Amino acid sequence: MEVEGKLEFDGYMHYVVKLTALNDLSLKDATMHIPMMPNKTDYFMGLGQKGGKRPEQLSWKWDVAHKNQDGGWIGAVDAGLQFSLRDEHYSRPLNTNFYLQKPLVLPQSWGNENKGGIDIGLKGKSVLVNSYSGARELKKGDVIYYNFNLLITPFHPINTEAQWNERYYHAYKPVDSVVASGSNVINIHHGNEINPYINYPFIATKEMKQYIDQAHDKGLKVKIYNTVREVSNRVYELYPLRSLGTEVFSPGKGGGYSWLQEHVGKNYIAAWYVPQFKDAAIINSGMNRWHNYYVEGMNWLVDHIGIDGIYLDDVAFDRVTMKRIKRVLTKNGKPGLIDLHSANQYNKSDGFNNSANLYLEHFPYINRLWFGEYFDYENNQPDFFLTEVSGIPFGLMGEMLQDGGNPWRGMLYGMTNRMPYQKLTPADLWTAWDQFGIKGSKMIGYWSPNIPVKTDNDQVLTTVYSRAGKAMIAIASWAERDVAVKLTIDWDKLGIDPEKAKLSTPTIPNFQNGAQYKFGDAIPVEKNKGLLLMIE
């Protein structure tokens, strides 16, 4: 057995394990054991499991035809590990509803004609991740690669100040209207006058620069939608790319916009189409030389247009490309902000993967998550929000999208929705934040053993935002009906004198009515909702 391993600064470990048969033999099994401290295995996602509490016992078998899964993440908020099982034939599959057209390649080693699998459960004093491959016959000289990747989480400390300071406006609107909304970071999607195509070529460069300069004059940052998951049919190099066969254009059934059928021919996958600009996208094959164009295009946008970052709508490239992108976006002291949006990948078309698990290798370089279409903010449990949506176990924070999310539950994780995307915008919550002084506060979540304020109902959770002399308590309910809860307060941890403290709820439109309470009162909490309480 020859082992090559590397550990990078962001917590990524890559192992190449080469097994060579020195003689003919019958191998009973080849296994890898990852023993974990039980108190660092509270949560799990991957291997067909939605993010949440780790099941006591998990048994999983390979099914690459239907499931985009080769590993999972197991951990707690303050420590965890993602594991992915690969071999030398690994090729990045397609995502976002195209997985079934290019599924995972079954690792010859770990998969072993579907004899392999993974069992997870308590064994002795450890929670054991047991990856096995099963029996096989080897001839003298046979070589098998049992490769695997590990990611150590969290990747970095959570930057709560950035969460409170950077307030997103996700639309191309006049700069003055963005300023009036209370936002200070603008995302320019594609399909408009200054960013017409889904990515390169950039043709409205003069107009884009004028807009960005105007925003900068007002103290705002501007990011653009720029993906490489698809290639626009407006790309100048269309025919050279077509001449490369399926290196850049992923193979598929063709079709889509008539122009594609007439000019590109067959064996491609038609994707997003914007009628106004006749922009018809073709799915990129995943990893290829066109990514060099993508990186250089981003480099040019930073140098000549002055973009402050990019908005990613799902990701089709690997962490190496992400590192290159982050490097060009942050050069010369530029902010290089990257926010990642994903529709929920836990469905048949996407191979029942978890968006956070799928993109975890990119999280060290992401500033904000925005998950996303088809995420259910009403019927999932708190641990689903924590693991799959919030980003908190990985050193990130996020926002909510689908139907505006649930503002009460979102506040447990420091999340609002995004301007001006939903009818109920976060403007009033942002005002409440500022009136309290959330900037500079210390966030202590319900998952922390140091939480200073709890309720007497384990279905009604709290997160505390603490400042000297006052605290804002986010309360959110998963109880089956309206309830009334009493608070349990550790005044020493809270750092407030109970003899001088007052308890109230400020009036926040479309969120809660104002009220005064006494400590010890039963506080009413509606089903699926919550409150923001002030102790000062």
Image (cartoon, rainbow, N blue to C red):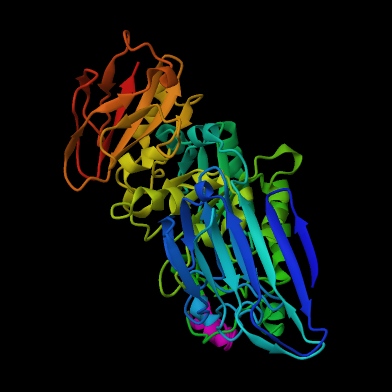
In the rendered image, residue 527, in percent from the top left (x then y), is placed at: 20, 44
In the rendered image, residue 288, in percent from the top left (x then y), is placed at: 70, 72
Q: Is residue 468 visible?
A: yes
- Residue 211 quadrant: top right
Nearer-the-camera pick, 458 or 323: 458
- The residue furthest front is 124
Q: Is residue 190 visible?
A: no
Q: Which region of the structure is painted magenta?
A: 257-270
User: Residue at horizontal 75%, vertical 70%?
Assistant: 17
In the rendered image, residue 370, in percent from the top left (x then y), is placed at: 46, 51
Q: Does the stretch in magenta take in 374?
A: no
Looking at the image, residue 11 sits to the left or right of residue 103; the answer is right
- The residue furthest top is 500
Q: Against 410, is 360 above or below?
A: below
User: Residue at horizontal 33%, vertical 12%?
Assistant: 498
In the rendered image, residue 60, in percent from the top left (x then y), is placed at: 48, 72
Nearer-the-camera pick, 304 or 399: 399
Q: Does the stretch in magenta take in 268?
A: yes
Looking at the image, residue 411 sits to the left or right of residue 109; the answer is left
